[in-house]
Image (cartoon, rainbow, N blue to C red):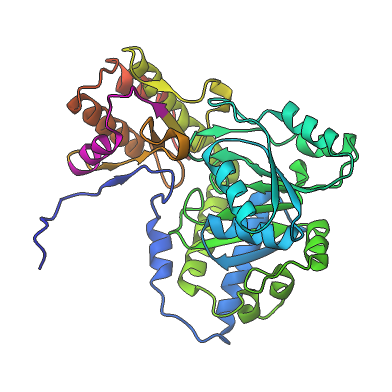
Amino acid sequence: MTSTPRIPGRRLLHSPGPTPVPDAVLHAMMLQPMDLADPRVSEAIDRCERGLKQLMDAQHAHVFLYASNGHGMWEAAIQNLVQPQGVILVPATGHFSESWAVQAEALGREVIRTPWNPGYPIDIEAVGRCLAEDTQHRIEAVFVVHTDTSSGITSTLEEYAPLLRRLNHPALLVVDVVASLGAAPFSMRSVQADAVLGASQKGLMCPPGLGFLATNERAFEAARRNPAARYYWDIVKRLDEVSYRKFCGTAPQSLVQGLSVALDLLLDEGLERVFERHRRLAAAVHAAVQAWSEAGPLQFFACESQSRSVSVTTVSVPPNVDIERLRRVGRDRFQVAFAGALGPLTGKAFRIGHLGDHNPATLLGCLAGIEGALREQGVEVGQLGLPQAIRSLDGYIPA
């Protein structure tokens, strides 16, 4: 027995990760574990690898799965793809690009950063200047965050590979799609990325704990030549048909079973419908925030509408708003869990996650709960937040 009373219904989860897990995924994860030689283990891993390749348009890539979160996948990319004391270029997007850069420095790499312009996507011209100045080709890799989960800003990726070719620069292009994969279109082939990394707890609709690194042959050969110390993270050792070796030990079977089903759900829904669903839900959130902002205090952090992500919306607040109290009221009184911002935006913004297993009903419940929490805290908001969100969704019937 506990002293905490049961709360009827379901608390809505609108953080940008973890995100709600579909019932079918939860049921798959309830299966009993299997012995390591059971062929069903290898079959589930294979389904995950094939599903990720299809989702990323990366049919010829090697996909390596890890019992890890996204930070672990950053380390896998660093230790496999960059020589000891090697140089990395990290275009600034905010908290998550800076965190990746700090992690690389902790692992002995030198990091070059482009300037961060708060509220705006990556400055590709600054990236070009850094690469052009690197006449000795010391930069071994460019680490790009597609969607920064703290700022809610998505940067375009299509210019990097042509830029590297135009400058005849041999750096690898490495892309973090943790916050975008499964919510926004991404093609490893079209972007011409050499390596891509992600994690399970956002658009992939699984609990935290499973990550992946995908590489083309060029990146894999860079890892093969790299003398950097590693064992668990080593993709060269993990390129094996035996499931035990693919995971450098026992596979996290429950998570693998869940991811295989989650990928099936996305592919069965149809990727274009998945992306359209995310576009429509994001547009409804943006319509509500725009209406709220008409009263003055609340504003989009992303200054350009086209850079606002389909995964998460970051809302700036005035200094007198206590973000953590706002979140507690939303969670405890209105049963809506949403997020604060991170890094330099801590205490200055809150975040609404709208990626993963969501529909108009969950989204409108989320917006109502957040508006209720804002009003309870005395934050002035425009009167038409919910009506504008409903109007944005008018005529949208999920497939």
Q: What residue is rendered at 56% in x and 79% in y?
A: 40
Residue 242 x %, y %: 67, 81
- The answer to whether residue 328 is magenta is yes
Q: Nearer the viewer, residue 148 or 307?
A: 148
**Quarter where residue 221 is shown:** bottom right
Q: What residue is rendered at 58% in x and 67% in y?
A: 66
Q: Which residues are magenta?
A: 315-332
**Quarter where residue 91 is shown:** top right
Q: Nearer the viewer, residue 69 or 192?
A: 69
Residue 289 x %, y %: 38, 23
Q: Does the image show residue 287?
A: no
Quadrant of the snapshot with the N terminus: bottom left
- The answer to whether residue 187 is magenta is no
Q: Does the image show residue 45?
A: yes
| Side of 389 relative to 95 (left or right) | left
Q: Nearer the viewer, residue 397 or 267?
A: 267
Residue 8 x %, y %: 16, 50
Residue 397 x %, y %: 43, 33
